[in-house]
Amino acid sequence: MSITQQYLLDSYRARLHGEPGPPAPGRHDLGLLREVRDHRRFHAVIAGRPAHGRLRRALTHRLRSLARRLRPRPL
C-alpha cells in the first residue's frame, strides 16, 4: 500500500468516526530535517567539534588527498 493510499484510508476512517483527519504526507518533513540538523549540531558542540561546515571540510580533505594521489610524479 502506498503512502497516498494509506492517507486516504486514514482520512476516510477519521471522517467516519468524526475525528480530525491525519496530516498530509510530507507536511512535516522540513521540520523533521531541521530538528535532526539541530540535534547533530548540539551534540557536535557538546563533544567540542565545530557545529557547522564539517561536511564541506571532510569533502575538501578527501578531494585534496585524492588529487595528491593522482598528481603525476616527477621521473
Image: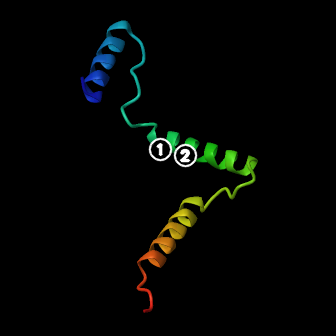
Identify the residue at horizontal 38%, vertical 37% (top origin). 26
Front-most of residues 49 and 52:
49
The residue identified by callout 2 is: 34
Identify the residue at horizontal 40%, vertical 23% (top origin). 22
Labels 2 and 1 touching (C-beta < 8 A): yes
Determine which quarter of the picture holds residue 50: bottom right
SS at mark 1? Answer: helix
- Spot the residue most to the bottom: 75
Determine which quarter of the picture holds residue 8: top left
Front-most of residues 56 and 39:
56
Front-most of residues 28 and 74:
74
Q: Image height check: is 70 above or below 75?
A: above
Q: Image height check: is 70 above or below 73?
A: above
Number of residues whose C-alpha sits closer than 10 Å to that of mark 2, classed few (under 14), some (14–19) or many (20 or more) = few
The residue identified by callout 1 is: 30
Quick one: quadrant of the C terminus?
bottom left
Q: Residue 33: image x %, image y %?
A: 50, 44
Q: Is residue 45 left or right of residue 36?
A: right
Marker disc for residue 43: none
Q: Give amino acid for label 1.
A: Leu
